Each structure stands twice: as C-alpha cells, then as structure tokens.
C-alpha cells in the first residue's frame, strides 16, 4: 500500500494567512501543527514514510521536504505548473505504478483537510483498500454532512448511508458544488455524503480507467511509470494539459464507484468560515485568534498575526491581518475572495 498526499494548492481563500510562498497546507492555525504535517501523521500505522509520496508545486518542494523530513527526498515531486487534480491524480498513479507495480494500492489524500477522528479515518481507509484490491473501480471516502454546505462536492447513494458499515457501498452519482437550496434538499433526503476528495485504487485499475475515460492524461502516468526522472517527466507532459478536476475528468464518467461512509469530523478548511467551526466562540458568536480583540461585535472572525486587530461594532464580518496584508469582508461575500485577490495582485504587479 502506498499513499500520495496532494499538496499543491494555493489556498487563496485563506489569504492573508495563506500566501503563494506559505499556502494553507503549511499553516498551523488548526491544531498547532501544519495541515500537511497532520495529514502525514494520520497515516501512521497504515503506510510507512518510505511509501508516502507528496505531489506539490516545484517552488514548494524544498519547503515540503523540510516539513516532512522523514519522507524520502525523491518521494516529494514538484509539478512544473498547476493543472488541477486530474493531472495530480495521474501523477500519483504513475508514481505508485513505478514503485509497486499494477497490483499495488494507492491512497490519495489532500494536504489541507482537518479530520477530528484520525483512528476512524484510518479504519475507513483500510475498508477502502480491501475493496480497491479487488480491482475494477475507484473507492472513495464520503463523510457525514452536518449542514447544507455549498462549497463541497456531494456523493449520492442508493439509500441512507450506514456509518457502521464494514464495506463500501455503491455510489449512485457524484455531484459538484450546489446552490444553497439544492444542498438543503439533498441533505433532507438522507442519501448524500460530502465528497472528501480521498480516493483509493489499485494502480493498474486506475491506469485502465484513465485510458478509457481520460486518455489525455495517460502520458503523465506512462512517463512516470517508465522510471523517468519525475521532474523531467512532468515537465514534458504537464504544460499542455487542461486545468480539470479528477471528479470531472474521471469520476463522473466511471461506473461502479464505491464509497465508504465515514463520520470522522472532516472539514476541508476551504475559507475563513472554517475557523468558526474549529475554534471556540464567545457569547456573541465571535471567533478571535492571535493578536486581536473585539468589542460590541457579533458573529465576527478576528484573526491577527500582526498588525494587531481591534474590531468594534461589527456584525458577521471577517477581519484578518498579517504583515502580508489585511482582509475585511462580510461573511456572506467571501465567495468573491478569489476575484478580489486577483485584482489586488494585478495592482501589486504594476
């Protein structure tokens, strides 16, 4: 069994704490250790460090090696450019094929998730691995939804998921991020899980699936499987690929996908609202972290790493400050984060 940690995200929605030089997976806001470190630690007792790969960006490879010194240097592979998860999963497949062959099993995890019940998560991964070893399809982990979230993908099952099951169930369909009304309707049926972005597969099976449904990414797999230097292999195959998610390129086209229901306290820490779910709130629903104070505020997030924050008379607002910048945003408007940040970077570049 091998594991591949995807750690190439930019974490724009967590700016200014997350920056291109120090993206979200390196932040220790959640739990005192970086999210990347926590992800690797969850694999203890399941996959040894020498069988763990990390796919990140080329400019973050050395920083990743410093964060995970027990992982062999050659196992940390830098992408020459970001091409989303369809390309990263193809790279994962090629790495596992080269290291263990077609009968080996690969577990792919994201480096920026919070999981409260690590032991329960490992149990779910073992169940997924047993199913994946039989071949034929991809197995994923679906987590229990606790609200009609619009920022996550969903997995529909034929009937209400059994969170005490020992074996994965068949997934009826994968559904991308819904609007609020659709999410509420899905949750009410009791048949939907959150898509955790955790996938388990037999390496030979995943290569066959790519060949059938996503042949455009097959050269990535073949270049790495052949034993070519990973950096050279990705440099030769990545630049012409489209930016496409694994769900869209592969999962939506693959039949017989199985899903393991897991109630493990999963959160992908996708935006500043995640800090409310992870940290205590005061009597007025405010979440305060670092060098920050609030007065006459309600439902606010104030997070400061310097300059200091003093928020007064605000409602449902996020204020975050670091030496790299200051964010002030209505919570309901955080969906516009990437657009506003892109405009800011254009001005900085002038």
Image: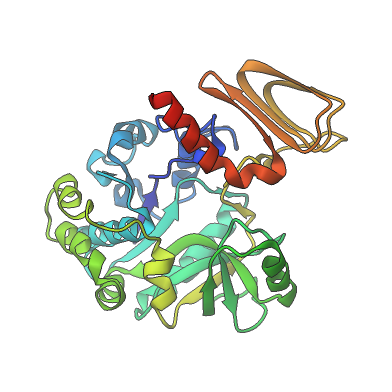
Answer with left or right where residue 171 lies relative to residue 242: right
Q: Quick one: 68 or 223, which is closer to the camera?
A: 223
Q: Residue at x 48, y 60 (%)?
A: 197
Q: Quadrant of the N terminus?
A: bottom left
Residue 164, how many percent across, how many down? 64, 72
Q: Residue at x 45, y 78 (%)?
A: 257
Residue 325, how many percent across, how many down? 54, 23
Residue 136, how many percent across, how many down? 35, 81
Vertical placement of residue 169 versus 102, above or below:
below
Q: Quadrant of the C terminus?
A: top left
Answer with left or right where residue 168 lies relative to residue 1: right
Q: Residue at x 40, y 77 (%)?
A: 253
Q: In the picture, residue 61 is in which quadrant?
A: top left
Answer with left or right where residue 194 lies relative to residue 132: right
Q: In the picture, residue 222 is in which quadrant?
A: bottom left
Q: Quick one: 36 or 231, which is closer to the camera?
A: 231
Q: Residue at x 22, y 55 (%)?
A: 240
Query: Extreme top residue here?
Result: 307
């Amino acid at each position: 069994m091998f594991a591949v940690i995807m750690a190439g995200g930019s974490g724009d929605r967590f700016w200014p704490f997350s920056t291109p030089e120090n993206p979200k997976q390196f932040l220790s806001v959640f739990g005192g250790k970086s999210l990347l470190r926590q992800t690797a630690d969850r694999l203890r007792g399941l996959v040894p460090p020498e069988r763990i790969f990390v796919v990140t960006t080329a400019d973050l490879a050395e920083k990743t090696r410093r964060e995970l010194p027990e992982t062999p240097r050659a196992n940390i592979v830098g992408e020459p450019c970001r091409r989303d998860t369809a390309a990263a999963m193809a790279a994962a497949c090629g790495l596992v094929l080269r290291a263990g062959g077609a009968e080996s099993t690969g577990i792919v995890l994201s480096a920026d998730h919070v999981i409260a019940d690590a032991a329960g998560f490992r149990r779910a991964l073992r169940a997924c691995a047993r199913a994946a070893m039989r071949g034929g399809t991809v197995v994923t982990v679906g987590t229990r939804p606790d609200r009609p979230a619009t920022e996550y993908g969903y997995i529909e099952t034929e009937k209400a998921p059994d969170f005490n099951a020992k074996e994965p169930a068949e997934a009826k369909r994968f559904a991308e991020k819904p609007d609020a009304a659709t999410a509420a309707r899905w949750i009410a049926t009791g048949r939907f899980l959150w898509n955790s972005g955790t996938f388990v597969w037999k390496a030979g099976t995943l290569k066959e699936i790519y060949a059938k449904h996503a042949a455009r990414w097959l050269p990535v797999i073949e270049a790495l499987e052949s034993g070519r230097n990973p950096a050279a292999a990705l440099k030769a195959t990545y630049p012409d690929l489209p930016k496409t998610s694994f769900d869209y390129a592969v999962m939506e086209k693959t039949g017989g996908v199985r899903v393991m229901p897991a109630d493990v306290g999963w959160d992908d820490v996708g935006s500043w609202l995640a800090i409310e779910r992870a940290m205590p709130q005061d009597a007025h629903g405010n979440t305060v972290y670092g060098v920050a104070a609030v007065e006459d505020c309600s439902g606010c997030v104030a997070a400061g790493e310097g300059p200091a924050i003093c928020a007064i008379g605000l409602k449902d607002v996020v204020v975050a400050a670091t030496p790299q910048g200051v964010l002030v945003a209505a919570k309901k408007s955080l969906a516009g984060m990437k657009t506003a940040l892109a405009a800011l970077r254009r001005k900085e570049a002038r």
